[in-house]
Amino acid sequence: MIKLASTKPFAQGGNRLCYVHPDDKSKVVKVRRPDFTLEDLRKKKGFPKSLKPLSSFDDNLEEFKVLSAFQKKYGEHVFKHISRCYGFEETDQGKGLILELVRDGNGLISYNIKQYLYEVGPTESFNVALDAFCNFWQETSLPSRNLLAHNVLVQQDDMQRVVRLVVIDGLGYSGFFPKSMLTASYFEKRAKKKISLLRQDVEKYIARAKRGEHPTEIGILLHRDAD
Ligand SMILES: Nc1ncnc2c1ncn2[C@@H]1O[C@H](COP(=O)(O)OP(=O)(O)O)[C@@H](O)[C@H]1O
Ligand SMILES: [Mg+2]
């Protein structure tokens, strides 16, 4: 049983808390936020989604299934741009999903795009990495929900050059029709749309940071696990 209660999460999203794995600094443990249960989430969704079983609202379970399916279908190379998943472990905060914890070359936990744009700005290496990521996403056309700037991480090397963008949330197909009814060209069009939304999100944060606005709290790191 992993003990998390006495440690501080390094980040929180809308649904989950993220902790550094106490036995392995290269892994993250994600647990459900105790102040926002699956029942709360189901209620918030309203009718007719509220008729679905509780397990269908569980991000950890959904992510585990999606990442396992991706590995089988697309192979190892998808882990260049999505975090690797190691399955579940019991914790004192409920079931925890264990994943690759993305860190920079200097050992600090990587920012997501939103925080990177506020803290560092749109550097040349960021723009190159964004183009490489978008090309990869279009080529593979991995099914995803909207790609949001706070769900894509910016990994820097020890010279602060951006070397990799990594999606850590919002993967999988969430459309209305069963996947088996859809063609490859459907997923290609869908990927194109998601890429253009991500680019819009990037532009939005660049403009906000320029105006000197402060970021909202979602996805802003609570600490970067510096020693
Ligand atoms: N594997 C990871 N490595 C580093 N940081 C991460 C990782 N996963 C999540 N984070 C950080 O934690 C934040 C919240 O995690 P996320 O999985 O998006 O939670 P939620 O499902 O609640 O939105 C992210 O915005 C990101 O900045
Ligand atoms: Mg998120």
Image (cartoon, helix red, strand yellow):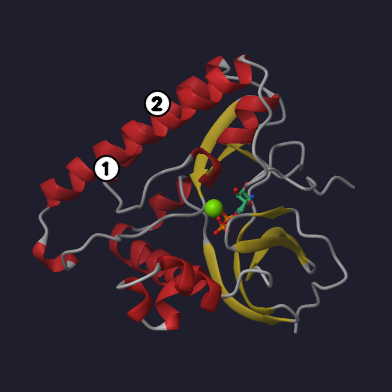
On whether ligand 1 comes within 8 Å of the CB at mark 2, the answer is no
Q: Quadrant of residue 76?
A: bottom left
Which residue is more in the foreground, 224 or 11? 11
- Judge the density around disc 1: few (<14), some (14-19), many (≥20) Cα neighbours within 10 Å: many
* Quadrant of image for the N terminus: bottom right
* Residue at far front of view: 47
Q: Report helix, strand or loop for mark 1.
A: helix
Residue at the spot of label 1 = 191
* Image location (x, y in percent) of residue 4: 79, 72
- The disc labelled 2 sits on which kind of residue? Asp
Q: Nearer the viewer, mark 2 or mark 1?
A: 1
Number of disc labels: 2
* Image location (x, y in percent) of residue 11: 70, 53
Could you tell me which residue is drawn at 32 percent across and 31 percent down?
A: 196
Task: Report, in whole angstroms, how far the alpha carbon at label 2 lies from the one at label 1.
Answer: 14 Å
Q: Is residue 130 visible?
A: yes
- Judge the density around disc 2: few (<14), some (14-19), many (≥20) Cα neighbours within 10 Å: few
Relative to residue 34, is residue 44 drawn left or right? left
Q: Quadrant of residue 147?
A: top left
* Figure check: 88 above or below 157: below
Residue at the spot of label 2 = 131
Relative to residue 210, is residue 147 drawn left or right? left
- The disc labelled 1 sits on which kind of residue? Ala
* Image location (x, y in percent) of residue 71: 38, 63
Q: Quadrant of residue 215?
A: top right
Could you tell me which residue is drawn at 26 percent across and 46 percent down?
A: 141
